[in-house]
Image (tube, rainbow, N blue to C red):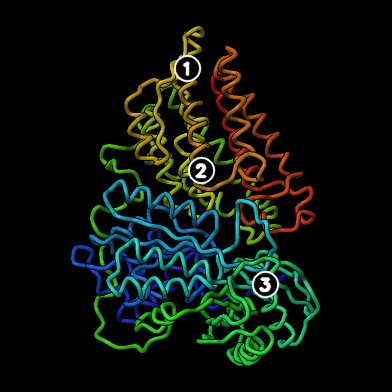
Amino acid sequence: MAYQGKKLINDPNAVVTEFIEGLVETYPGLQYLDGFPQIKVVLRADVSPSQFDKVAVISGGGAGHEPAHAGFVGPGMLTAAVSGEVFASPPVDSILAAIRAVTGPKGCLLIVKNYTGDRLNFGLAAEQAKSEGYKVEMVIVGDDCALPPPRGIAGRRGLAGTILVHKVAGAAADAGLTLTEVAGEAKQAAELVGTMGVALSVCTLPGLVTSDRLDADKMEIGLGIHGEPGLAVVDLQPVDVVVAHVLKQILSPDTGYVPITRGSNVVLMVNGLGATPMMELMIATRKAVPELQLEHGVAVDRVYTGSFMTSLDMAGFSITLMKSDPLILDRLDAPTKAPYWPVAVEGNRPPAKIPIPVPVPQSYSSTTDETLSQPQELTKLGYTLEAAIEAAANEVIALRDDLNEWDAKAGDGDCGTTMYRGASAVLEDMKKRYPMNDAAETVNEIGATIRRVMGGTSGILYASLSVSCQIVIVEFLPEILFLIQQPNQSMLDIFRYDILCKAAYANLKGHSEPTAQEWANALEASLAAVSKYGGARAGYRTMLDALVPACTTLKERLDAGDDAVTAFILSSEAAMAGAESTKNMQAQAGRSSYIAPENLVSIPDPGAMAAAAWYRAAALAVASKLKS
């Protein structure tokens, strides 16, 4: 029976920031950027970017994996760690804040676990940082050995082996190597590591109900660190049997996930998932070492046992193997003061909090409050724009429980909550910030709102799509009004697209009355960019299965001579049909790709359903407003 999980917390929405505050009080070598609650970055207290003469190493991801990632910040390891909300990727602005805070002339390396949201957020942040003159490289870690290949474009999940990559890269950077050399060693380390996890219980997100999918006499093999279902549910077995099975799976020559064979040397990590006593972890280690030596013929050079990358309060463990050589061992043995490697607590305590460096990543757009606010009187465009945004946001809010229910089938079940947070913030900001008579300024502000509050995969997708998806809701409204007055007006194709909201805003500022065709082209380009960074496309069971058909229909109907309102309505119907079609798709991207197809039968993709719902609501609102 499901029950409310017990937690020693105050507010479920404040667990991440309060964790960071406690962490820096405990360890005097750490500080955090003064950007709560949006910017959650822990960094070395001894690093100033203008004076830092080594490569900065930055990692991060969703919270809930403590001590990863902030617990591994320190000399000889990470220079900074960026946190999102629980199990949600950190937003682009947070990653940019970290890059700006610690990156000196030698550049920075981003180490990213292989999840779609992390890849998108860190990838876009890297591109933005490069445009500002920073030297940035990125290495993606996918060390999961539980699921057999092929894994499609999603690839192998990033698990506890990422911590070993952190240590190798951090030591290489501390030794004074160049960015290219540090990135090369990190990439090589990522190719030598494999991990597999086993759980006795699922995890409970703060403030949510505990799932009852795992019976008391069952255990789950090969699950992910976000609570997503694993390879198989089996009867509870003695730990020696479990360890032998996991090692056999990691070293399987059939998958070839790690280049470890008889005669190899390895590093072993036995990692607790959050609620596993040290006694049980040591019992697992006691079996793993002789099993490797006697059954698999490999020499064990180093053993690390403890909780390094957890999954909140999950009971279970993971085993990581990394092929070792003299250089790898030198990097792992190099001194570090990262708290959870671990190190002793020592040194004078500097101020726990420092300002975000200039240039400051803004929660909102760069336009000041004095020059940007909702106009006293709305034009016809403003009223129509307001109706579209309000209808779309309210539709998302109404779908929260359905989206969470669908999403729970594929993992953490927070899609509805994330979308609800974004929609609520849009409604709030619209009342006091959005200049509704100015389409360009409004789309800029919507993008800023979404980046500020959503995070996760949905957050970054909608932030990058705010240039386009949101303009389908609102931005070609000037053209809709224009067509009502001059229905035979030709449509020009002059819009230049840039995936980042700032660049899009700059382009919008140059066109006071952009055409519907221009916005359709921008949507098409934006979807292509999202596909480029995330790897997905139509048919992969994602939000693109709603938005790609919408874009295709929109362009077709406009090319056929339909007026913009009719084209908008018809494209919204295509979006809904595309979302419904995901019920019969096998996921090839995102966390759903790790779920057995039979477990997703008749369940639509929540991201696609959310996109189709707000798109449809906005289209109907526009049509209704213009007819009234």
Q: Which amino acid does label 2 sit on?
A: Lys
Q: Residue at x 54, y 41 (%)?
A: 393
Q: Name the residue under label 3.
A: 202
* Residue 387 in sight from this viewpoint: no
Label 2, secondary structure: give it.
Answer: helix
Q: In this view, does 561 lie above or below 113?
A: above
Whether pointer 3 and pointer 2 mark residues with C-beta atoms closer than 8 Å, the reply is no
Label 3, secondary structure: give it.
Answer: loop
Residue 1 shows which numbered tag?
none
Q: In this view, does 528 lie to the left or right of 230?
A: left
- Location of the C terminus by quadrant is top right
Q: Is residue 160 left or right of residue 139?
A: right
Q: Return the residue found at the far front.
A: 263
Q: Which amino acid does label 1 sit on?
A: Leu
Q: Which residue is drawn at 65% across and 79% down?
A: 316
Q: Name the residue under label 2.
A: 532
Mark 3 and mark 1: Cα distance apart in space: 53 Å
Q: Which residue is drawn at 29% across and 64% down?
A: 178
User: Where residue 123 appears, x then y in whole percent?
Assistant: 43, 52
User: Where residue 42 appears, x then y in whole percent?
Assistant: 36, 69
Q: In this view, does 391 lie to the left or right of 381?
A: right
- Sequence-wise, the earlier of marks 3 and 2 is 3
The front one of 419 and 4 is 419
**Foreground tag (1 vs 2):** 2
**Foreground tag (3 vs 1):** 3
Q: Which amino acid does label 3 sit on?
A: Val
- Sequence-wise, the earlier of marks 1 and 2 is 1
Q: Which residue is drawn at 30% across and 74% down?
A: 174
Q: Name the residue under label 1.
A: 481
